């Protein structure tokens, strides 16, 4: 079974996921290169929703491009083991080792990325077809800022995400995951 077939077997939890999964299917049927950011319209990304053992806090980074506190994550860049990508991104962006709560995604979402400059080069507006995993980490572990991508890393109380996150479109997605906890 291919990674696309596995992802298309995901059971949507609400209308947003149902519609986004249909959009994923469309992209898979029409583009050969969705695993890489060489596709300028839509490509696969992976996020980790990192919680502490008590499930009271989420580990977030202050992302410079989005000018907001956000989950960790990144581009698949050709890799189809999305869980491995999620765990690697947690380590790269926060310095923390995390473990998967499940091998199955907790959420999927299609996210709009506005045009921006990265490493001195303009990146056109595009879509991230995102797969999110629930992972757990020790909230006493030493945190490390990933210069160039974020400017801070912190454990945020789950009930305060809306205070920290400046991206209004992300609040319902974070809340959907919190409700699933």
Image (cartoon, rainbow, N blue to C red):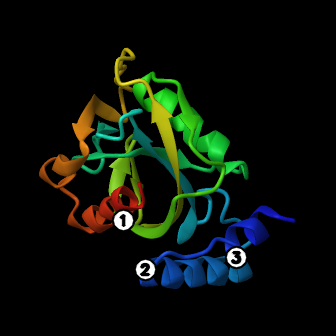
Of badges 3 and 1, nearer the viewer stands 1
Residue that protrudes farthest toward the front in the picture: 54
The foreground one among 62 and 43 is 62
Q: Can residue 114 be seen in this view?
A: no
Q: Residue sitting at 17 percent across and 55 percent down?
A: 162
Q: Label 3: which residue?
A: 28
Using the image, tell me which numbered label, if any, was put on residue 115: none
Q: Are marks 1 and 2 in contact (CB under 8 Å)?
A: yes
Q: Label 1: which residue?
A: 176
Residue that protrudes farthest toward the top in the picture: 142
In-image side of 81 versus 155 (left or right): right
Q: Residue 142 at x, y = what percent?
A: 37, 14
Q: Residue 130 at x, y = what percent?
A: 52, 61
Q: Residue sitting at 56 percent across and 43 percent down?
A: 101
Q: Residue sitting at 35 percent across and 20 percent down?
A: 143
Q: How far apart are marks 3 and 1 (CA)?
A: 25 Å
The foreground one among 59 and 119 is 59
Task: Examine the image and state in which quarter residue 178 appears.
Answer: bottom left
Q: How crowded is mark 2: few (under 14 residues within 10 Å), some or many (20 or more)?
A: few
Q: Are marks 3 and 1 in contact (CB under 8 Å)?
A: no
Label 2 residue SS: helix
Q: Label 2: which residue?
A: 16
In-image side of 13 versus 105 (left or right): left
* Mark with earlier residue (1, 2): 2
In-image side of 157 versus 18 (left or right): left
* Mark with earlier residue (3, 2): 2
The foreground one among 54 and 111 is 54
């Amino acid at each position: 079974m291919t990674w696309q077939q596995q992802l298309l077997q995901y059971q949507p939890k609400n209308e947003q996921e149902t519609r986004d999964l249909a959009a994923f299917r469309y992209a898979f049927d029409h583009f050969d290169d969705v695993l890489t950011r060489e596709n300028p319209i839509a490509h696969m990304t992976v996020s980790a929703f990192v919680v502490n053992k008590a499930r009271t806090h989420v580990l977030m980074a202050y992302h410079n491009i989005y000018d907001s506190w956000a989950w960790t994550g990144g581009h698949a860049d050709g890799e189809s083991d999305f869980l491995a990508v999620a765990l690697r991104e947690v380590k790269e962006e926060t310095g923390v080792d995390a473990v998967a709560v499940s091998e199955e995604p907790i959420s999927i979402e299609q996210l709009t990325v506005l045009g921006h400059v990265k490493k001195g080069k303009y990146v056109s507006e595009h879509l991230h077809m995102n797969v999110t995993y629930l992972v757990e980490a020790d909230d006493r572990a030493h945190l490390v800022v990933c210069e160039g991508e974020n400017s801070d890393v912190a454990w945020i109380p789950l009930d305060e995400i809306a205070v920290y996150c400046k991206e209004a479109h992300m609040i319902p997605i974070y809340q959907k995951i919190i409700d699933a906890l």
